[in-house]
Image (cartoon, grey):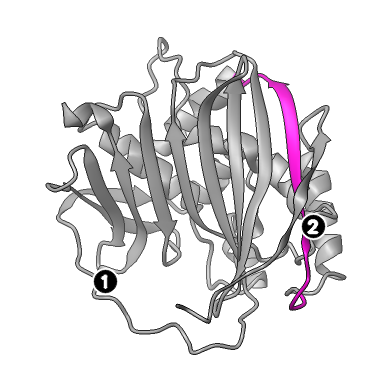
Amino acid sequence: MNTDITQIPLTKEIHCVRLNSLPFMPAVFCRLLALSLVRKPGLAFGARVQKGQLLFPGFVPDPDRIRRYRKVCGFSCTPEEKIIPASCLQTFFIGILGRYITSDFFPVNPMGLIQTGQSFTSIQPVFMEEPLDLSCTLQDMTRTTKGIFTRFCLEIHRKNTLVWEGTSTYLTRDPAPGKGLGKKIQDRPLPAQMTIQVPENAGRKYAGVSGDYNPHHLFHATARLIGFKQAIAHGMWSLARTLAALEKTMTFSHPFAVDAAFKLPIFMPATLTLGYENIAVTPGQVVFELRDADKGLPHLKGSLHLPNREK
């Protein structure tokens, strides 16, 4: 039993709020900056957090934005392609997540919130210009020696049918007293299969198609304001870029699942290696990673489950 990890209690009742429109991102960032001045970085021990849910029905994806997303992340961009990349579906929640962490539901300081992981299951293909119902629910909050981890459950329904679900994990640095981080696990690199270039403006380009304009992704100067030596790539861009590369080597059919952890930051510009291999004992499962091409340091680790490969 790990005594350095404690669950933060949530209310049993879920407080639901129905949104009439997607949040206006400049207003969200202004509120985020204001709250960063008054909210404490951590959370009092024993505090119970209200479990909230934000709903936005009838969202219609913008085809132009989807095409630009495909180009920025390396997916194929043929005019006849109507399916939205599964990783792109997470970006529909950027404004909703921003609204959540700046609401009264979220008592932790929203500034400096870092995404550390993303998992999702793409149950059915989602097409451009079809109405979708989005929901974002606080799943759980955990206090660790690194800080407070918060997980949000994201769901997309089409005509009352669940077509995509994901979990976004974020870290708020508020170290709890404990025994430290434990022993370092042996890190065996996967066979490098290809090289991926990360241009210096990758953060700004991804912000334009995702809506995630966090300052540490945009310019070196704004990144330094919040403690980074230079601008870092979005974790979700690195995951999308990886999936785009894998799509060129294997067939994705539904349903499929992805589970990824964001490791060391990618300082832009950068040259990365993509490594992946099939798991022999688990048919249909592929593990993948992104590493620094020179030093071999890990930036992204994950797995992809493709049921069609079991046959």
First along the sequence among labels 2 and 1: 2
Q: Which residue is mark 1?
A: 295
Q: Is residue 201 visible?
A: no
The image quadrant where one finds the N terminus is bottom left
Residue 160, by quadrant, is top right
Report the span colored magenta. 44-62
Query: Residue 32 got which mark?
Result: 2
Circle 2: is it few (<14), some (14-19), or many (20+) Cα within 10 Å?
some
Q: Give the SS element for disc 1.
A: loop
| Picture layout, residue 167 above or below residue 293 | above
Report the Cα–Cα distance between label 2 and label 1: 36 Å
Query: Residue 21 got which mark?
Result: none
Q: Give the SS element for disc 2.
A: helix
Q: For the residues carrying marks 2 and 1, which lies nearer the camera in this image?
A: 2
- Residue at 60% across / 67% down in the picture? 142
In front: 267, or 3?
3
- Residue at 44% across / 82% down in the picture? 181
